Image (cartoon, helix red, strand yellow):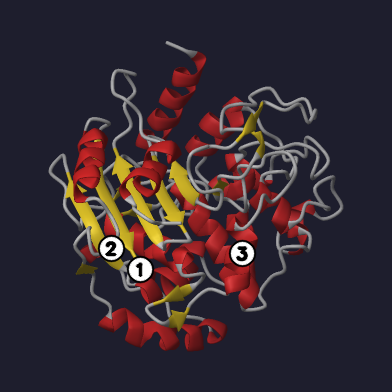
Amino acid sequence: MSSRLRLLTALLAGLLLSGCAPGGGEDPAARPDPAEPTTGATQATEATDAARESFVWRRQAPRRAGFSAAVLESLAAEAATTGSTCLLVARRGRIVGEWYWQDTDERTAQEVYSVTKSVTSTLVGLAQAEGLLDIDQPAAKQVRQWRGTASAGVTVRNLLANDSGREWSTESDYTGLIRARDRTAYAVGLEQQFEPGTTWAYNNAAIQTLDAVLSTAAGKTTAEYASTRLFEPLGMDDTRMTGDAAGASTSTAFGLNSTCRDLARFGTLFAQRGEWDGERVLPAAWVDEAVGAPSQGLNAAYGLLWWLNREGPLRGPLDQTDLTGSPEVVRVGRLAPGAPEDVFAAQGFGGQVVLVDPASETVVVRLGVPDLTGETASYSFVDAARVVTQARRGAR
């Protein structure tokens, strides 16, 4: 077994031990009612209530939406061979194609792993829009333990861009963090390894510290804030953020449970630059900030906890497992060379993808069960982008 597969196996095993198994989680109907929104969030929530109540997924024939039905069916058949549980293609808020496998349907929620990161980024954008935080200010404003330490200069933007320089290792990220009873306390307590902005690393523990930033800024748990400010306005009724074994923190690097349809709503929010069903939910300026360009110069494929298709030096989640602080380039290019440069995606372990093509307002969502044997073909950013490049006719 390769070192990469051993690492992924450890990740999945840890998640299973933490109760975040794919397709698992509590029954959404059994969830307690979310807490009342804060004063700053009340108007925004009320402003989207009407849109949420009125929105119903409508279907549109592929041909009318500018797609080839035959190519879509072919791509769906390929997705079915990769352990997929669902595939959904939507354009301008209408479903063009939708497929389910492995005894799932539109209400089946599952663990979507690092897709969680893009949701966390969006929560930070909402909090900034409310004036609760400023991403260019030190995170120590909310994380008191970092004041007067080497981490005092780490900004919220550094945490979102994955260039914080916070301590990273395979053990801390894929064993220590996952098994910690209080994940946020564990992540906050790690050391500062490099100067902020000098090294890029796919640092789950650093991203977990955004739970401390968000909960302190909002005055409620990150899960509660997500419910009132994002999931409820979009009608993501089958989506929830999970926590750790002690119930002490919300998992912000992984742990989201969601469905193809709910994530299509999330993707459509970004395809429409922050609007949902005619209402402004997220500032357009935040969408541009998060996905419009690389967030730093070390990895052209990364925005603010979103994956991009921009040209330049590329690093993947496991490319740099021995950090040296050196800006050595792993490779140069784009994640999907044949796809439009401005497509972007939320991605998670096991081929979970929410890909957005802003020019055509197309959203592709694929969820599946990770295969640890290496016998099943994988699904990726490139596969989702093929819906735009092969099935979408006249997208550009």
Q: Is residue 239 visible?
A: no
- Mark 1 or 3, closer to the camera: 1
How far across and how far down the image is residue 88, in percent? 27, 53
How far across and how far down the image is residue 317, in percent? 56, 33
Q: Is residue 228 above or below residue 117?
A: below
* SS at badge 1: loop
Sequence-wise first label, 2 or 3 = 2
- Mark 2 or 3, closer to the camera: 2
Q: Is residue 150 left or right of residue 247?
A: right
Residue under the image location 35 percent in, 29 percent down: 378
Residue under the image location 40 percent in, 52 percent down: 256
- Mark 2 or 1, closer to the camera: 2
Residue under the image location 65 percent in, 72 percent down: 128
Residue picked out by circle 1: 92
CB-based contact (under 8 Å), mark 2 and mark 1: yes
How far is the residue under mark 1 from the one under mark 3?
19 Å
| Residue lying furthest right | 148
Q: Is residue 139 above or below residue 319?
A: below
**Looking at the rendered structure, which numbered label has been put on residue 65?**
2
Task: Say what amino acid the circle numbered 2 marks.
Answer: Ala
Residue under the image location 49 percent in, 84 percent down: 44
**Looking at the rendered structure, which numbered label has been put on residue 288?**
3
Task: Say what amino acid the circle numbered 1 marks.
Answer: Arg
Sequence-wise first label, 2 or 1 = 2
Q: Is residue 12 left or right of residue 95?
A: right
Sequence-wise first label, 1 or 3 = 1
How far is the residue under mark 2 from the one under mark 1?
9 Å
Q: Residues within 10 Å of mark 3 (few under 14, many from 20)?
A: some
